[in-house]
DNA sequence: ACTTTATATGTAAGCGCTTACAAAATGAAG
DNA sequence: CTTCATTTTGTAAGCGCTTACATATAAAGT
């Protein structure tokens, strides 16, 4: 069933059918009803390709994220998909892993499908001098379609960012810990993303503001497990895989550093925090009395563990909503849309801290 | 930049360019290199629409799942996407929620984009007499593209299923519990899916085989929270939302039924199991001695909680791989592809059981 | 050198749709 | 009953690509 069949059946030209389908006002009510009836009856659906050829839009957006099996990103993608669907858009998903090359490749592929916009989820960009080249391809992509970052930050024409104020989140937690008399707060991190750097800044600022010394040995870096080889992990079958690994690895590393002293932990994500909790259990430390722990992202892990984890909520849903609102404006041809949007994070107090 | 430009720049016809792009063998090595060089230099990407018009394929598959923020499905989708990407396919994601109407709508939309195949993740189909109509639309969809179910089961032309043997998984766990002297095993479930029914069968068979009585009061149903209104949950902001709810709700319900006696729990998913763990904690029951608990899906929750949860691994990755292998065969035009594939589940022993 | 056969390239006809433009129908005004 | 303005419909030219078929070129056999 194509437009010609419909035209023939309803005794009009294909142009008229096309007008009806696209809701053009230049059709008489009578013919419109006639054509509509035929369409209904014959279950005709316009061919996207042909349509796309003409309009060059497919009402589809691309979503790119390093790993959809990560809770945080799943939450974001889930939300994005639902909302966009309400506006009649479909989403093509690309999980690029953390490798830059893979990400570029994915981006190119998505663009080749003529998506109307591109959303990147997750704090993609590592620190260090490589920032430059890592973001360059994004600017390139932004020449073709508007690009939206959820919890990432890149400046550029046609690039729009929504991100949680992780600096403030980390600041608040650190300050609260200090106020409860904690002297040695361990900063636990496993990546060098923009977001992680912001957290470090918040942490250090809080210490400085309180007149506490900033100790290098308390910045504890945990090499991300299996990172970079994420693409090959397809055939590995230990299911909670990386997550399980992260938690246990964190515990082991903390146990291994016997001389390191700390009375509290600020972890850049909940897996690390749960790892710290497991460490406390192994050492027989009471939580939160002997060791306070705070995580980040307020993921479901926070309510699974025991005691339940205090965590910072970075408000993904709001970030997504912001991005979408602005995307609709941009796709609508509106100019001077705000490019930069920061939303405050808030602490969700549970049982691993005494504030 | 279109195919004409490339043709002009490399001094050949568009047909030759097309052949190069599509890897046809009927091009001499020399011209191929020449064209490839031009393509590389000019960053040409074929227009999907035009291509689709000719081939009527977009090298894209549709993935439909009730909720991507659910760990199990996220794992599946993540894996599917990675693998399909290796074969040059992109994935359009649809999260339909659990409402039948929404699912149908999504399916229709995906089909209108001329996907090459449709994958449904998750045990979609509820029990009861509604099965019939609920699966009918799938058979309808299967007339247009091959349909693959991951952990779901529907018979029909052009429908291919891969599912874990949840009956056997439940049987094994139940048997192991019985063997450790457990007399009253609580069967905890929160949905009526095909998979849940299989688990119940496994549970009852194990009891029967061991000569234990099957007690109706030990089949404990927990109304799924917020189900059906999943679409509206977009604007709700309590982040671990449903998950947090599930866990606490389970604990509360168990606490509320003070007269119900049981010495062990078999939960149909890990959230319920963690809820049972929280219940044990609230009651001061030692785990696994006074209360043994086993979950299902071996999700990351299993390693977050304390003590760590024994859970059944339903082998999602393998299910996905099976589905994909068969999909590639089907798309390749192969006939008599196996439609039905069941893979055994295995117990991952941790600390909440003493077997 | 002259067929015969295999290989490489080009030509042109769609694929199903949109839309500018032309043509026809309708209606109002003279 | 014209005439002109207005509304409705049709015609046809693409959109960028694939591919059957025709043609040209090269390789091999005699």
Image (cartoon, coloured by chain):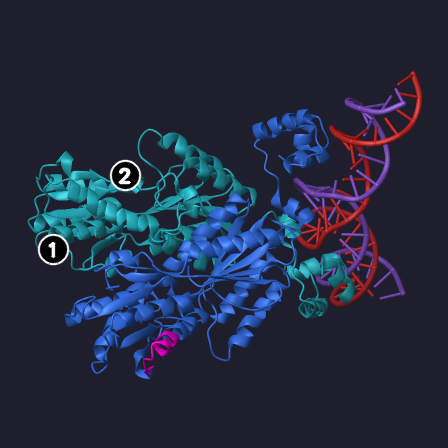
Chain colours: A cyan, B blue, C red, D purple
Q: Which residues are magenta?
A: B204-215
Residue at position x 8%, y 55% from top?
A289
Residue for badge 2: A223
Residue at position x 49%, y 47% from top?
B83
- The secondary structure type at the circle numbered 1 is loop
Quote the CA–CA distance across marks 1 and 2.
Answer: 26 Å
B208, above or below B284, in the image:
below
Label 1: how many Cα within 10 Å (few below 14, some 14–19, many 20+): many
A229, above or below A310, in the image:
above
- The secondary structure type at the circle numbered 2 is loop
Residue for badge 1: A288
The one nearer the camera, B23 or B284, is B284
A190, above or below C6, in the image:
below
Q: Quadrant of residue A197?
A: top left
Read off the chain for label 2. Answer: A
Label 2: how many Cα within 10 Å (few below 14, some 14–19, many 20+): few
Q: Residue B315, position in %: x, y?
A: 41, 57
């Amino acid at each position: 069933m194509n437009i010609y069949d419909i035209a023939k059946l309803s005794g009009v030209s294909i142009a008229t059918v096309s007008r009806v389908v696209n809701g053009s006002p230049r059709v008489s009510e009578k013919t419109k009803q006639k054509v509509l009836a035929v369409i209904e009856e014959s279950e005709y659906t316009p061919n996207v390709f042909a349509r796309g050829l003409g309009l060059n839009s497919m009402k589809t957006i691309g979503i790119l994220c390093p790993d959809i099996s990560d809770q945080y990103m799943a939450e974001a993608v889930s939300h994005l998909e639902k909302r966009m669907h309400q506006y009649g858009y479909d989403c093509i998903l690309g999980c690029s892993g953390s490798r830059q090359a893979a990400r570029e490749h994915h981006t190119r592929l998505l663009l080749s499908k003529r998506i109307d916009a591109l959303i990147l989820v997750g704090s993609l960009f590592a620190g260090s001098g490589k920032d430059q080249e890592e973001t360059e391809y994004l600017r390139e992509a932004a020449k073709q379609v508007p690009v939206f970052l959820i919890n990432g930050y890149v400046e550029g024409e046609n690039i729009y960012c929504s991100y949680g104020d992780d600096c403030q989140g980390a600041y608040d937690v650190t300050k609260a810990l200090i106020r409860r008399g904690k002297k040695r707060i361990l900063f636990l991190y496993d990546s060098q993303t923009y977001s992680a750097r912001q957290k470090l800044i918040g942490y250090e600022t809080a210490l400085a503001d309180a007149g506490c010394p900033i100790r290098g040995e308390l910045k504890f870096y945990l090499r991300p497990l299996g990172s970079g080889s994420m693409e090959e992990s397809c055939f590995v079958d230990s299911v909670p895989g990386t997550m399980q690994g992260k938690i246990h690895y964190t515990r082991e590393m903390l146990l291994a550093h016997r001389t390191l002293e700390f009375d509290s932990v600020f972890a850049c994500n909940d897996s690390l925090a749960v790892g710290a909790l497991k460490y406390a259990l192994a050492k027989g430390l009471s939580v939160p009395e002997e060791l306070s722990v705070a995580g980040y992202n307020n993921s479901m892990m926070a309510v699974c563990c025991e005691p339940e984890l205090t965590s910072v909520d970075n408000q993904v849903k709001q970030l997504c909503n912001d991005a979408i609102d602005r995307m609709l404006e941009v796709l609508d041809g509106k100019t001077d849309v705000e490019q930069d949007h920061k939303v405050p994070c808030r602490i969700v107090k549970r049982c691993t801290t005494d504030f």
